[in-house]
Image (cartoon, grey):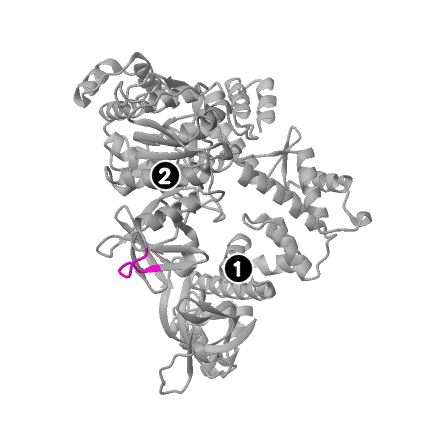
Amino acid sequence: MSCITAAYDKTLFCNEAGKYCVLRLKTADPMVPEEARDRYRFADHLIRFVAVGYDLPRTGTIKMELDGEWINGKYGPQFQVSSWHELVPPTIEGILGYLSSGLLKGIGPKTAGEIVQRFGTDSLHVIENQPEKLLSIRGITEEKLEEIKAGYAESKAVRDLMTVLAPFKLTPKTAMKIYEHFGPDGAALLRKSFYQLCQIPGFGFRRVDAIVVKSGGDLQDPMRVQGALFYALEKSRSEGGHLYLEAEKLLGEALMLLNEKIPQLDQRLQRPQLAQELRTMVERNVVASKKGNIYLPHVFNQESETARKVAEMALERREPVKLHPVMERVKGRLGITLSPRQCEGVEMVFRHNLSIITGGPGTGKSTILKAVIEAYRELYPDHAIALGAPTGKASRRMAETTGMGNAATLHSLLGLHGEDSGWQEKKQLEADFLVVDEASMVDMWLAYQLFARLKPETKVLIVGDADQLESVGAGSVFRELIQCGVVPVTVLDQIFRQGSNSLIPYNAKFIREGRGQLHYGRDFSLTEAESQEETAALIRVLYRGALNCTAMGQVQILTPFRATGDASANSLNTAIQAEINPPDISKPELSNGGRLFRLGDRVMQIKNDYDVALYDEDGQQAAAGVFNGEVGVVSRVQPGMITVCFDGRYADYPLESLGELELAYATTIHKAQGSEYDTVIVPILPAHRILLSRNLLYTAITRAKRRVVLVGMKKAICMAVGKCGTGKRNTLLGERIRLYYQALSLRDSQTSREELKNAS
């Protein structure tokens, strides 16, 4: 760790949304390595060097003391800042420079001058300890004072937190995440116990435990037990998709974590100690308990409130409408016919406030959706219709299939900024009719946000395929809604799409029904291979051949594994990149952390980034945010940054953000949910047996509109079809919906009150 005093000189790059900065700084410190110095001789004779970090001040009015380390970046030595603080000389000039710097919200140069003129060298003391005195200055209102106080408190809190974290080499970006979670009390909480970090998603217990061990902390700290219990619950949610853990299972997993760092048998924690701590946590509402199942409190609330809202909506009925003449006109305008089952589905939607339509590929979900929307428009011309899907890709498909161009992601419709961004004001959805597509991808958190933001009178239609993979996030919302027994459901099982000659929907149906004897032909084929190496070699040939018939964006390799073997997504991406987009002097490239991106590469966003700035071809700002699973093409490469085009919208990725991207010639089947391609190529081998399941294979082949190419062994196909799934997720959503429904149906009885209590 090095320390250097420097001042701002020039901004080389700054991502305003992500607060990542590349600055040129100036200093008189001779310890700056020769190789890191700017070779130009400046008139002031000060040394210039490049510093990188998050939320660095861009003002020349103050000096900074920076802690960090020298690193060798792709473009030479840089000082990577881990923490910094202002050096404010106790002089009129120094204090004026600091207050004028823009670091404190609410104080500009004019206000700074008036504060210093009035209070002199006591200005900072007044702001911190007697801020009400600032009201004597013209232009500082009560509202302005509150802004100044908040800005000063935030600045101080962030600096304090950075100081606490500095010995552990956590990045400034991580520090900002901690600050956003804990707010101004972050430093004080961590000084009390670092195990508070276990409450933050992404901070594993082992990571926090390592920090405590390094600092010589107390392994018997009661907060350590809570941290392990929190971590076990969070891990089961994020990795297993479970909303709760049984108490005994939770204790067992936490006990293993806690005793890993205690080699002495007589000093190890025992199950009774943990059981007592868990009881205390339940009593204090630190965790929630229901039927011996333990929830994180916010997860418990999400499940409970969603169940209550669903039950309330299921009880509501709409006034009957004369639908037949309307539907006859709609069918004529659209040039469609509807099967008896599809007609039943349309009638169901208009009879109920909440309803579900489910079915596999080719069963007419898009047709019935268009008919419902068109009929609703005719019946209620003044009503607002909203179309939403969990991902950007799925929402764009929805817009295309319905003919309505205003489909959006659910996050955008609901005004959401990510699950981990703390408290969010509930923006009510101003729609009279909401249609949600690809509902199998909706997790518990998103379902809670959706139902919490509906107007009481909003009609909701939920559409999806229950046989696809579960949502990436926790819960099993779509299946629970279908199986709860109180939400009306129409199941479409007659195949219409792609004509009678297409094998894709029929084989999808066979897989769904557990029949392993698939039919092969021109649009559904199996190229046999016995090893991962042979499979990967064949896929390279097949991929190149497919590109002769269709565009690159319409050919997708879908694999069960991300990182294991030659037929994994990572290995195939490297091989296809070398095959399709090899190194060339005319194709600039950028790499970081083992990831290499070249001009023209097909890439995927692998995490939700709600703040990344987007712009169009003319450089005009577009809607912010790029979401997990969105695919684009590298359109520009420049020193320290690449630009990616996502369907006509452009986003810049500095070197530090390349970890948010991966090559997308191949991707996992899980990542492909909600997407469609002309052609999909799927490796399927016995080596994939850990992940092989009926839902996985079904999801893979239903991504294809025209052609499916399986590469591997019939034995692996039979293994997948014979395995029904990966296990039931722990959730009580369906049961709680039924309890609420029963209770609300008999609202005034004693029985009802008891049932409501049980449901909660």
- To which residue does mark 1 refer? 175
Residue 59 quadrant: bottom left
Which numbered mark, 2 or 1, is in the foreground of this view? 2
Mark 2 surroundings within 10 Å by alpha-carbon count, few (fewer than 14), some (14 through 19), many (20 or more)? many
Kind of residue sitting beneath label 2 = Ile
The one nearer the camera, 608 or 742, is 608
Going by the image, does 216 lie left or right of 20?
A: right
User: Decide: marks 2, 1 in contact (CB < 8 A)?
Assistant: no
Residue furthest top in the image: 340
| Residue range highlighted in magenta | 583-589
Report, in whole angstroms, how far the alpha carbon at label 2 lies from the one at label 1.
Answer: 44 Å
**Could one spot residue 62 in this view of the protein?**
no
SS of the residue under disc 1: helix
Residue that appears at 42% across and 84% down: 46
The one nearer the camera, 497 or 574, is 574
Residue furthest right in the image: 266
- To which residue does mark 2 refer? 539
